[in-house]
Image (cartoon, grey):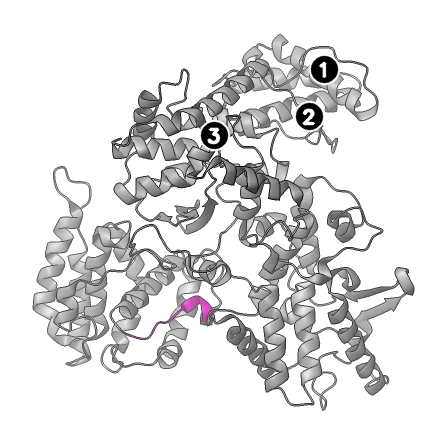
Amino acid sequence: MNLLDPTDRPPLRGAARRRHRAGQQAHRVLIEVGLGGIARGEADAPLDDAARARLLGALARIRPASTRSDIHNAIDHALARGRALGLWTHPGIGTATSHPFVASPIATTDADALRAAMHRRDALARALPGLPTDLSPLVRQGLVTYALVYFDALLAAPLLQALAEARTQWQRDDVLLVHGDARGVARLRRWRFGAVTRPLVRRWRRDHPVAGPTEAALEAAAQVLGIRGLPTSVVALLREARLYWAPRLPPFLLALATDAQACESLPPRAHRRLFGGRGPLLPDPARGDAPALEIPTAVVASGQVLQSPRGVPARHWQAWRALRHALDVRETGRGVDPRGVADLQLAAWQQAHAGIGGWTVLMAAWARHALGQARGRALMPSSIRRYMAYGRWLVQLAADLDPATVEAEELLERLTAMAAHLAEQRGGFLALLGLQELLDFRAAAGAPAVDLSEYWDLPAGTGRPRANLVTHREYVDALAILDARSDGSTVDRDRALLHLLYGAGLRWGEAANVRIADVRQDGHGDWRGVWLTVRRSKTANGLRTLPLHQLLGPDALQELETFVGQRQGQWSHLPDARLFAEADAALAAPGIEVRERLVDALRRASGDAAITLHALRHGVANALMLRLWGVDPARSGQLAMMMHAGSARPGAYVSDHEWLTDHRTRGAHTTAALAALIGHLDAQVTRASYLHLTELVLAEATAAHPPRIPRSILAALCGLKPQTLRQRAWRANAH
């Protein structure tokens, strides 16, 4: 596989000729310095410090400077491609100039390897219908893994490894992969099943719900399939699959499929709200937003979990110190299970101290739960000690706060000081995560649920994933609720504010401080425009000018302009008057009661008590991204809820992409355009934390590349009759 094309091509012009010539010269330079393996794209080709020094020295001797920078960038691009294909892990040599070599339209691939990948993919599809029905669980798991990679473009190694974990949740139409980021914080990625994969998953999860090691499953499935050269390791499988999907997926979607940290999918509760109640394949305790919480029956029956506190505070302190000592277990000894030792010591603790009740007993019960497999992934005793760094604050509450009857508001008021203190400590987010698990444990035993991220505004990564968004339908319903609940003096202001928050994706602080003079109108007819200048924001990129005539629907834009005209006539003598101020305080931002009124309308419209105003930004980010991708809502039923009639672009624009950006941009750079629109400093934040519907777009893209097999075999794989498959293909082409 030559990562740099050394062959001559037909005459090229301009930038293409310059890039191709740089690639030829870079190939020769790598050969001269003894790095032919890098030039030929050999797996695990060496690149030590001495070879890197020889390479940089050879580059420094090249003249003129423009040629040197082109060759430098060509070699850096080759190293990056090798990393993306899994050939090596060598870092690049940096970019010499801003020359856009990475955007080169010239892609060189190994034609033989690509043909082999296509052949094995088609052979896998042909072999699946003829397999026996009495396959082992490990073989069926391997078949599912092959199908997800070859047919559904699951191309990230951490996600592939997560298939075998107990925390992964298998649904009827997709799989929710729970994996950890670099800090160990859980992230969610949802993957849609294609027509070939869905029946395999249903059969495997119905008969064999327990998963085994991924590599062992691949080896077992390869022996049954008997396809020559079929990869049996995760690295080799992903390398071949990436080679197949690279020319077939847009660059941006390929990057999302290969990066486990790219996007945050919606948790089950929000997903069910948006897309309906397609339940799991089997009764699964892990249906919530967090790993399963199973309260031991004996603990609940004896009343130990929610027992009222008894005794003087000194007894609670004594019990707390004994609880810490019970978790102080040596974890490095041979032949000893530290979890088992800690569980025995906790059982002895419960016999000695269960009578005092309160939060101390609740923490001990949660510690025993966290040591076992019911949690989804058992914690070590030392990890539980770190998680329970909040313990001494709860012990202070043990004598006067009953966990069985305390209301959520009172509890949150008591815990506010604890959150502020933990946020300043190193590793405090672990304690916040542990405290949330304790409160979930308490809720599973019958107490009121408490969601800390809803009240404490925790930063990203300090707890469970909280991805959520507001759809266009919920936004319309919230407007109707505002009409019914607001009095005549505030309804116009509240509606205009909600239009701006949803249509333009403003933060609350940005919208609250918009001045009347910040809304500018110019032009007329087809050339008419309405512009909003954001002058106060939390980031430098938040200070931006937004084209409201392109972001808002026509009715919402007309309503906003009418409201702006009213305020201009009312406060024309006050240049710094706030657009959404109260009638008797023109220079002050709207109060918290306005925000609470909007949040209440959104929660009533969505039926989700966890919705906040920030979910409006996530909603508009996903709606704008679908427009940037050019998704047609007429062909995408589940995505249509994110679009609205106002999304229809003016006829003067070739695409939604050009409409929003007013210039043509490569698909790989659309996140940067979206980040600029919603005011993010770093487009990686937008990509990692704001895009929640990518699995639907990726499923559409992969469905456009079915295996090259007879229609009768494809119908058998999908569990359909051939004529039914023919009718569906005809309907799809008719659109």
Of the pair 179 and 227, the residue shown nearer to us: 227
What is the spatial separation of the Cα atoms under label 1 and label 3, in whole angstroms? Answer: 62 Å
Residue designated by label 2: 73
User: Residue shown at 39%/65% (left/top)?
Assistant: 422
Q: Earlier in the sequence, mark 3 or mark 2?
A: 2
Is residue 453 located in the magenta-colored stretch of the structure? Answer: yes
User: Residue shown at 21%/63% (left/top)?
Assistant: 295
User: Residue shown at 38%/35% (left/top)?
Assistant: 144
Q: Secondary structure at mark 3?
A: helix
Q: Is residue 716 left or right of residue 638?
A: left
Q: Quadrant of the C terminus?
A: top right
Q: Is residue 426 left or right of residue 263?
A: left
Q: Dot 2, how many residues are within 10 Å of its Cα: few (below 14), some (14-19), or many (20+)?
A: many
The percent coordinates of residue 273 (x first, y second) are: 47, 63
The percent coordinates of residue 50 (x first, y second) are: 54, 16
Image-quadrant location for residue 324: bottom left
The amino acid on which the numbered mark 1 sits, given as a three-letter code, is: Arg
Image-quadrant location for residue 28: top right
Q: Dot 1, how many residues are within 10 Å of its Cα: few (below 14), some (14-19), or many (20+)?
A: few
- Outermost residue to the right: 524
- Magenta segment boundaries in residue numbering: 447-454
Residue designated by label 3: 712
Of the pair 629 and 573, the residue shown nearer to us: 629
Is residue 699 located in the magenta-colored stretch of the structure? Answer: no
Q: Earlier in the sequence, mark 1 or mark 3?
A: 1
Viewer can see residue 510: no
In this rendering, which labeled residue sits more in front, label 1 or label 2?
2
Q: Dot 3, how many residues are within 10 Å of its Cα: few (below 14), some (14-19), or many (20+)?
A: some
The amino acid on which the numbered mark 2 sits, given as a three-letter code, is: Asn
Q: Is residue 126 left or right of residue 165?
A: right
Please determine whether, in this image, residue 712 is positioned above or below residue 198: above
Residue designated by label 1: 61
